């Protein structure tokens, strides 16, 4: 799935986003792109769960 994260603007943000996703699925495959403010995720977690943890981390996300 691909998520749009408007608040992810740099590498530090991308690390925080990655850490948040890994908190609910440590085996997720994550490809962040701060320049486009997107993240591609291969995970067993539902979009709602990912959006919840990202919101809590300060990076609200929408599903593309």
Image (cartoon, rainbow, N blue to C red):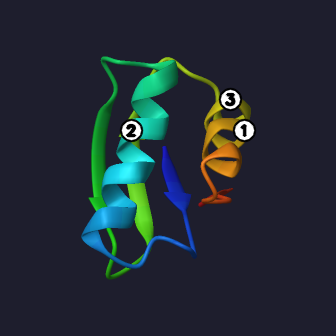
Question: Height in image: 28 above or below 62?
Answer: above
* Residue 49, x across and y down, in percent: 68, 29
Circle 2 Cα neighbour tier, 10 Å, few/some/many (<14 / 14–19 / ≥20): some
Q: Is residue 62 left or right of residue 10?
A: right
C-alpha separation, residue under disc 2 versus residue under disc 3: 14 Å
Q: Residue at point 68% right, 59% down?
A: 60
Residue drawn at (34%, 73%) of the image: 34
Residue 41: x %, y % from top left: 39, 40
Secondary element at image label 2? helix
Provide residue 58's location: percent of width, then percent of height.
Answer: 64, 58
Q: In 3D space, how far apart are the residues under numbered discs 2 and 1 (Cα atoms)?
A: 13 Å
Q: Is residue 29 above or below residue 35?
A: above
Residue beneath disc 2: 19
Q: Are marks 1 and 3 in contact (CB under 8 Å)?
A: yes
Q: How many marks?
A: 3
Q: Earlier in the sequence, mark 2 or mark 3?
A: 2
> Mark 1: which secondary structure?
helix
Q: Indicate which disc residue 49 carries.
A: 3
- Asked if the residues shown at circle 2 and circle 1 are in contact, with their CB atoms under 8 angstroms apart, the answer is no
Residue in the image at 56% along x and 22% along y: 45
Residue receiving disc 1: 52
Q: In front of the other: label 2 or label 1?
A: 2
Residue 34 relative to residue 3: left or right:
left
Instruction: Say which of marks 2 and 3 sits in front.
Output: 2
C-alpha gap between disc 1 and disc 3: 5 Å
Q: Quadrant of the C terminus?
A: bottom right
């Amino acid at each position: 799935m691909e998520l749009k994260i408007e608040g992810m603007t740099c590498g530090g943000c991308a690390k925080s986003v990655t850490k948040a996703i890994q908190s609910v699925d440590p085996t997720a495959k994550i490809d962040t792109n701060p320049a486009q403010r997107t993240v591609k995720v291969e995970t067993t977690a539902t979009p709602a769960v990912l959006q919840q943890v990202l919101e809590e981390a300060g990076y609200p996300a929408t599903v593309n």
